[in-house]
């Protein structure tokens, strides 16, 4: 049965004392009885609050150099007891106090791992009592409040002040979920260390796993979903509805794409289902937006919009004429911000930085695949021109642009670019020929002339058929990674038909 818990007692045992004082004073104001050990007990007593020593409850002092302090039935009984007649009778029989709240953090295993290679020191920072207390309190969240992170102290304090010293069922359940996230992350770090894996990889990969938030649902309404991480580190959210699973996935793809254009002239991109369907660079961001929209105005409907520079009022007025899910920029003029946030159903985000995670993972079969993120972006001017004809200066600029776009589309993929504008793309095809034809068909459908345009491929051409199709459409220059045993056939065709080709040596498959 859902009910609020009146906090009358709290077990407090923390390694870090920062942010704790205010919460302790709030609990003391509600006449909470404190139970504690060692340094935490001394900290609470210095605040003028009486504390019951854990050893006075257990009749045992801390032993084994402090390894065993709270591991005792009189502590865990007070936490794990269900507040029913039978369990309460047992608590009374064995003189066990009810513990309504558990405030515990963990030994600094991660910090120790980062500061030393001494195994003895690292092993000593594997917490046993703390992790056990957290799990016990989280398991019994129906009757007990668990706080496993100092980041939650302020929120719990507000709840206590607004609810006369009580914590609701939903609040306890929320804290329990966060507590298990803390314990999961902690165990994962220990596993990674003992298994001999890369400490740096673990730290980068799961650095935010202890912070989580539910999302409305997963890719589809019948799928549950939760986000582990801290979006506030990356964005300021100016307005709009709560982010969905699909929103977050699309936003991630948009940030990864626009990162390629950080520091360039004003560039605007439009994405749909993680794929760029419009990208354009111009002298002003308004022109760049209109150029990106022209690439595929049909797919742009309901898309994610992103800019590499400030969005001004003129651009915002243009954007506001179309239905979109999310708009992202490093800044907005005050007038643009006011206009875009007026529609409370549209999500407006300010991007704080263009960085992306150095590793990525996905669940497969009965395990997890972990890999370095594809952060490479080859410099076209340093790549190998393999044809007799070299690309013109304008073509080189467009080839670089096409490479940035092709890297962020699902394989197999082809991009067509002219004057720093994505005019055609084919993606997610089972053959490169199909991707090439799809890209040309899109460009033709939206009225673009392919004469003098360039083409990029995410992987090599196994046969010359793609360059043949490109030549017939008017495409004059091609960039590809190379590596096929039949590369020369494509090169020969280009030479015979006055096309230029650049080989980068870097493949950009995106599955």
Image (cartoon, grey):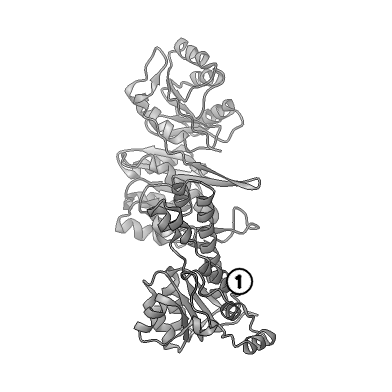
Residue name at image x 45 percent, y 71 percent: 152
Q: Is residue 143 above or below residue 362?
A: below
Query: Count of labels shown?
Result: 1
Question: Picture coordinates of residue 454 (x, y %)?
Answer: 43, 25
Where is the N terminus found, in terms of image quarters?
bottom right
Q: Is residue 162 above or below residue 466?
A: below
Question: Picture coordinates of residue 74 (x, y %)?
Answer: 58, 81
Question: Picture coordinates of residue 168 (x, y %)?
Answer: 55, 79
Identify the residue under disc 1.
Answer: 139
Viewed as shown, does residue 83 lie left or right of 405? right
Residue name at image x 35 percent, y 45 percent: 308
Question: Picture coordinates of residue 133 (x, y %)?
Answer: 54, 72
Please tell me in which quadrant of the rendered image residue 434 appears: top right
On the question of residue 348 being in view, the answer is no
Crowd class of label 1 (few under 14; some 14 to 19; many from 20; radius 10 Å): some
Residue name at image x 37 percent, y 30 percent: 419
Pick the front one: 30 or 342: 30
Residue that sits furthest to the right in the current view: 86
On the question of residue 405 being in view, the answer is yes
Q: Is residue 231 above or below residue 51?
A: above
| Circle 1 SS class | helix
Pick the front one: 240 or 261: 261
Residue that sits furthest to the front in the current view: 64
């Amino acid at each position: 049965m859902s009910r609020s818990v009146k906090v009358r007692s709290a077990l407090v045992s923390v390694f870090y004392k920062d942010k704790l004082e205010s919460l302790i004073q709030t609990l003391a104001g509600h006449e909470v009885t404190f139970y504690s050990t060692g340094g935490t007990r001394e900290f609470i007593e210095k605040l003028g609050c009486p504390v019951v020593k854990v050893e006075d409850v257990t009749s045992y002092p801390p032993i084994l150099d402090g390894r065993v302090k709270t591991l005792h039935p009189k502590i865990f009984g007070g936490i794990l007891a269900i507040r029913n007649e039978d369990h309460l009778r047992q608590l009374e029989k064995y003189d066990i106090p009810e513990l309504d709240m558990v405030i515990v953090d963990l030994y600094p295993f991660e910090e120790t791992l980062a500061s030393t290679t001494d195994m003895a020191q690292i092993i000593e920072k594997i917490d046993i009592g703390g992790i056990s207390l957290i799990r016990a309190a989280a398991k019994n969240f129906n009757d007990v409040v668990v706080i496993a992170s100092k980041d939650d102290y302020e929120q719990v304090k507000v709840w206590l002040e607004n609810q006369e010293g009580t914590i609701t069922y939903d609040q306890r359940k929320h804290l329990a979920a966060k507590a298990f996230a803390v314990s999961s992350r902690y165990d994962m770090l220990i596993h990674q260390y003992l298994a001999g894996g890369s400490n740096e990889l673990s730290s980068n990969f799961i650095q935010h796993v202890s912070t989580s938030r539910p999302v409305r649902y997963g890719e589809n309404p019948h799928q549950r979903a939760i986000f582990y991480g801290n979006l506030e580190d990356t964005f300021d959210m100016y307005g709009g509805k709560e982010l969905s699973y699909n929103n977050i996935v699309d936003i991630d793809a948009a940030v990864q794409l626009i990162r390629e254009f950080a520091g360039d002239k004003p560039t605007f991109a439009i994405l749909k289902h993680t794929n760029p369907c419009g990208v354009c660079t111009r002298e002003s961001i308004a022109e760049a937006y209109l150029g990106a929209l022209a690439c595929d105005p049909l797919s742009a409907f309901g898309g994610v919009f992103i800019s590499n520079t400030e969005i001004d009022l003129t651009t915002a007025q243009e954007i506001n004429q179309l239905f979109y899910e999310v708009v992202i920029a490093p800044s907005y003029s005050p007038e643009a911000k006011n206009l875009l946030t007026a529609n409370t159903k549209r999500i407006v985000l300010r991007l704080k930085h263009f960085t992306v995670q150095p590793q990525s993972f996905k669940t497969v079969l009965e395990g997890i695949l972990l890999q370095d993120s594809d952060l490479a972006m080859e410099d076209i001017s340093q790549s190998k021109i393999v044809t007799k004809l070299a690309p013109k200066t304008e073509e080189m600029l467009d080839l670089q642009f096409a490479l940035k776009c092709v890297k962020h589309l699902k394989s197999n993929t082809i991009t067509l670019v002219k004057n720093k504008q994505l005019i055609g793309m084919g993606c997610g095809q089972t053959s490169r020929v199909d991707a090439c034809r799809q890209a040309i068909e899109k460009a033709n459908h939206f009225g673009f002339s392919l004469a003098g345009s360039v083409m990029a491929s995410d992987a090599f051409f196994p046969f010359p058929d793609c360059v043949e199709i490109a030549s017939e459409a008017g495409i004059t220059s091609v960039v590809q990674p190379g590596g096929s045993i039949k590369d020369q056939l494509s090169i020969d065709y280009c030479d015979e038909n006055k096309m230029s080709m650049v080989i980068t040596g870097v493949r950009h498959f995106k599955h």
